Image: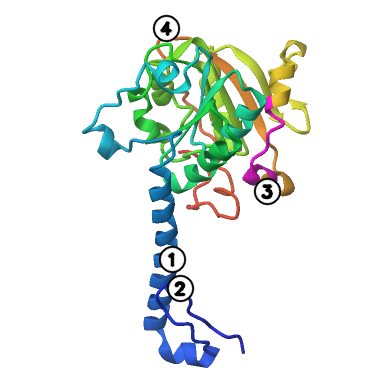
Amino acid sequence: MNPVGLAGAGFCYQAMTDADAIKVGLPFLILQFCCNFAVMSKGKLQKFAEMETFRNVFQYPFSVISEIPFDMKGGWRTKYFHNDNPIVLELGCGKGEYTVGLARVYPDINFIGVDIKGARIYTGARQALEEGLENVAFLRTSIEIIDRFFSEDEVQEIWLTFSDPQMKNVHKRLTSTFFMNRYRRFLVDEGIVHLKTDSNFLFTYTTCMVNANHLPVLYRTEDLYGNVLGRDETVDDQMDQKTHEILGIHTYYENQWIERGLNIRYMKFRLPRNGELVEPDVEIELDDYRSYKRPKRSGLLTSR
């Protein structure tokens, strides 16, 4: 018989047999859930409290930015980085592995990781401080309001690394025209957008969006590490040295996907400031999984 235990802050541990657990029933399961939740919540609260002391983290969720204007908008270089180097954003940065990795490789470029999950940002922010990386910052906010934090021409490039494909809601999809129009408000004219993903759905959608709006594609591959070129690629689309160096940075989950045999897809394209953007009218087969170790949420097969 396997022992069933309850352990956590403020609770005494008492081993139980399977039979004992069955006798206790639902109340025990509820107590166990509450205990685990309390432990996780305590850990998150500790991280949030510690992040308040991090000089490289700016926390402005919607509830805050709606009351307190972000006074560093347009002044990231002068007020924080204290240099005139280019600024690159990673939107939906998660734990900040890519943001920190890029900052190590390119000390003459400023990198800002953006995510709404503070417990995730904590990892990269702390690592950057420990390594003394002065060209890194993290912004905790919703990407839907990202244009409230940057002024016109303040950002040179945007990275979207393993973003949620948002298969049922185009307005939440980070490569939709909804977001492209927001990026235009602070990205330099002809600024570069990078997409790195394991999602065939997101990659296909983005390809259709780029083609529908005639956006200049600088590089595109459907199998990054297998070096398989997409159908629309030519010899002129070969990977340059800078892109090769950048794509050598792998996140933890990216390695998991590679081990599963999933293709990693990548493209980079320019985003002109002028011209009306149109949404592609296309039906796309849904991914048969949602993310690592998580099944897809519905039984639908396509985006319609």
Q: CA distance from mark 1 to mark 4?
A: 50 Å
Give coordinates of residue 180: x percent, y percent: 44, 21
Q: Which mark is residue 8?
A: 2
Front residue of 24/49: it is 49
Amino acid type of the residue that numbered disc 3 sits on in the rendered structure:
Gln
Q: What whole-number distance in Å separates the C-alpha atoms at marks 1 and 3?
A: 27 Å
- Closest to the camera, between mark 3 and mark 2, is 2
Q: Are marks 3 and 4 in contact (CB under 8 Å)?
A: no
Where disc 4 sits, the SS reads: loop
Where is residue 291 shown, x and y percent of the image?
57, 48
- Find disc 1 in the rendering and name its residue: 39
Question: Is residue 250 in the magenta section?
Answer: yes
Residue type at mark 2?
Gly
Relative height, residue 291 to residue 26 (above, below): above
Q: Are marks 2 and 4 in contact (CB under 8 Å)?
A: no
User: Which amino acid does the dot numbered 4 rest on?
Assistant: Asn
Query: Quarter of the image holding residue 59?
Result: top left
Residue 162 seen in the current view: no
Q: Residue under circle 4?
A: 274
The residue at the point 41 percent across, 82 percent down is: 28
Q: Earlier in the sequence, mark 1 or mark 3?
A: 1
> In the rendered structure, are the residues bearing label 2 and label 1 in contact, judged by CB atoms less than 8 Å apart?
yes
Query: In the drawing, does residue 218 fall left or right of residue 38?
Result: right
Q: Position of residue 56 (x, y in %)?
A: 46, 33
Q: Earlier in the sequence, mark 1 or mark 4?
A: 1
Task: Specify start and end residues of the magenta stretch as a single range.
Answer: 246-256
